[in-house]
Image (cartoon, rainbow, N blue to C red):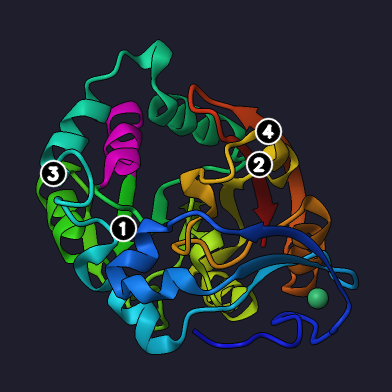
Amino acid sequence: MEVVNYCPYCSSNIYETIETQKFEDVYLNIIDPTLNTYIREFRKCTECDLIYRNYSLSKSELNLLYKGAYRDDEFRSENGYEYFHRIDSIDNEESENYNKAIFLLSNINCVVKTILDVGCGAGLLIKKIKDERKGIKVYGVEPDLKYSEIARELSNADQIVTGFLKPNLFQEKFDAITCCDVFEHIEDPINFLNIIKDYLKVGGYLYVEIPSVNNFGKLRKDDEIFTYQHTYFYSNKFLYGLFEKCGFKVVLCEEIKYTRPTIKTRFIVKH
Ligand SMILES: [Zn+2]
């Protein structure tokens, strides 16, 4: 664990303590159970609004978290295939995944022929998009080996790359990029957005979905959302500033309540 003295985004040392975490974080247990003895604190930066932690995970601890442990079968109650089939077989009217696919296909205001799904997991969103829009080409990138293999096998994706998003993974630029439940895992949001921008055609759209910070007070203090798999949390104010700084124009920002207790915020931004 590393001590954090300054806001990782704007370097300010002025903050408000939002919460002190005391619960046993199962993700810390995966890395090293003694990490749970640290008193962890959520801070909101007074300057830029970023919500970050003291302590933060070191590079090697993060690697341990993502090397297989993050989506480990033993850690979850079902394996990746069971998860894929359970979600994929939910009736459309009740399916968060289906609603997401329809929403983005109908709200992205350009002719979309190619989509890249960043952090595609087992490829569930890719599968729904391919089901709903024949002829569209959908690509995915996913760091987890097992889940990327499931996506390759079951999602009908045109290409799945195993790994983190980085330059030169794909030869082409995309009409749209989707990024659901990914931003809160990212260590360097500016670098990440710049890489995304390089993969997006000018005039193309980025769809981002993150947990909304506005209902955190209503969630249990040991909700999975607050575990160490999530690096930062973002207010709308922070994200507006971030998108602008990286050269994107916000065309939609709204809260969405799916069937789970967590409320999401979704953004559509234009390159
Ligand atoms: Zn800051």
Instruction: Say what amino acid the circle numbered 4 marks.
Output: Lys
The answer to whether 139 is drawn above or below residue 199 in the figure is: above
Mark closest to the chain's N terminus, 3 or 4: 3
Q: CA distance from mark 2 to mark 3?
A: 28 Å
**Residue 239 vs residue 9, the one in the foreground:** 9
Q: CA distance from mark 4 to mark 2?
A: 16 Å
Q: CA distance from mark 3 to mark 4?
A: 30 Å
Circle 4 Cα neighbour tier, 10 Å, few/some/many (<14 / 14–19 / ≥20):
few
Instruction: Say what amino acid the circle numbered 1 marks.
Output: Gly
In the image, which is nearer the foreground, mark 4 or mark 1?
Answer: 4
- Say what secondary structure mark 4 lies in: helix
Determine whether, in the image, residue 193 is placed left or right of residue 229: right
Mark closest to the chain's N terminus, 4 or 2: 4
Please provide the residue range marked out in magenta: 123-136
Q: Main secondary structure of the magenta part?
A: helix
Q: CA distance from mark 4 to mark 1?
A: 33 Å
Q: Residue 132 at what x, y percent from top left?
A: 34, 27
Mark closest to the chain's N terminus, 1 or 2: 1
Q: In the rendered image, which residue does mark 2 sit on?
A: 265
Q: In the rendered image, which residue does mark 1 sit on?
A: 140
The disc placed on residue 23 is none
Q: Which residue is depicted at the point 73% across and 88% down? A: 5
Q: In the rendered image, which residue does mark 3 sit on?
A: 79
Question: Answer yes or no: do the residues labelled 1 and 2 have beta carbons within 8 Å?
Answer: no
